[in-house]
Image: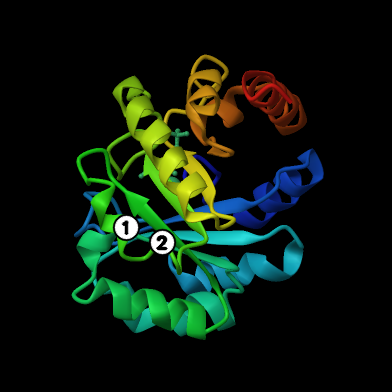
Amino acid sequence: MLPADFANLGRDCVALEEAGVDRIQWDVMDGVFVPNLTFGPDVIAACRPLVDVPFEAHIMAERPEEMLPRYIEEAGCEMIILHPETLGQPHRVYQQVKQMGAKLGIALSPATPLTHVEHAIDLVDEIVLMTVNPGFGGQAYIASMEPKIRMTAEMIAASGREIDLEVDGGISAATIAGAAGAGANVFISGSALWKYDSFAEGVTDLRTRADAARGR
Ligand SMILES: O=C(CO)[C@@H](O)[C@H](O)COP(=O)(O)O
Ligand SMILES: [Co+2]
């Protein structure tokens, strides 16, 4: 939702759902962990009743554990995506997310190693590999993340668990095949999706390209 019209977030949520997106990701930024400031649980909660599509909160904010109940219970986010660097005791917070009934996403910035997920492979529902440095939309896809995508896919396969591999940042018609071919199965597209003539055209084009790269 970072490229959305902040004066009409509800309208854009409805349009995205009508276009057939599988989920809506809210980029929560506090201006401390990343040099940008966006929206919090009250804004997400205001949009929740307008659509049925799952919400995931990508929380790029320090001490996110203090507001977890607001994202899960008030804002109705089914998935909570956290950056390990923002947590004093990551594993404890991961347990709290699951105990509150939400799905757990762990986001790794480009320089954050895969080892940050190893200890939580039995808890995590989604591993999010940032293919840009977090904080802004419209940045260039970092193709050198593709070996990390492959290693993550191998780690997931070895775990024997159903874990989504999401890529987030710079995903467009030009880059989605590379990410999909490396093993990603969930794709977050912001600025590229908004550039299509319609959301429906973008969703169809991006999904078709990803499926082709995954041999589906
Ligand atoms: O979390 C982030 C950025 O910090 C991403 O969700 C971006 O907001 C995706 O936007 P594009 O790179 O697709 O424009
Ligand atoms: Co994001």
* Residue matched to label 1: 118
Please state, as top left, top right, bottom left or bottom right, where the C terminus lies in the image.
top right
- 58 or 163, nearer to the observer: 163
Contact? badges 1 and 2 (CB < 8 Å):
yes
Identify which residue is drawn at 34% across, 40% down: 136
Please name whichever residue, 138 or 125, is drawn nearer the observer in this view of the structure. 125
Q: Position of residue 177 (x, y in %)?
A: 55, 19
Please identify the quarter of the rendering in which residue 19 is found. top right
**Residue 96 location in percent, x, y?**
41, 83
Query: Along the line of sight, which residue is nearer the eye, 144 or 21?
Result: 144
Q: Taking 183 as reference, is 116 left or right?
A: left
| CA distance separating discs 1 and 2 | 5 Å
Q: Residue at x 38, y 74 (%)?
A: 94
Count the marks: how many?
Answer: 2
Q: Is residue 129 visible?
A: yes
* Furthest-top residue in this view: 174
- What type is the residue that disc 1 sits on? Glu
Residue assigned mark 2? 121
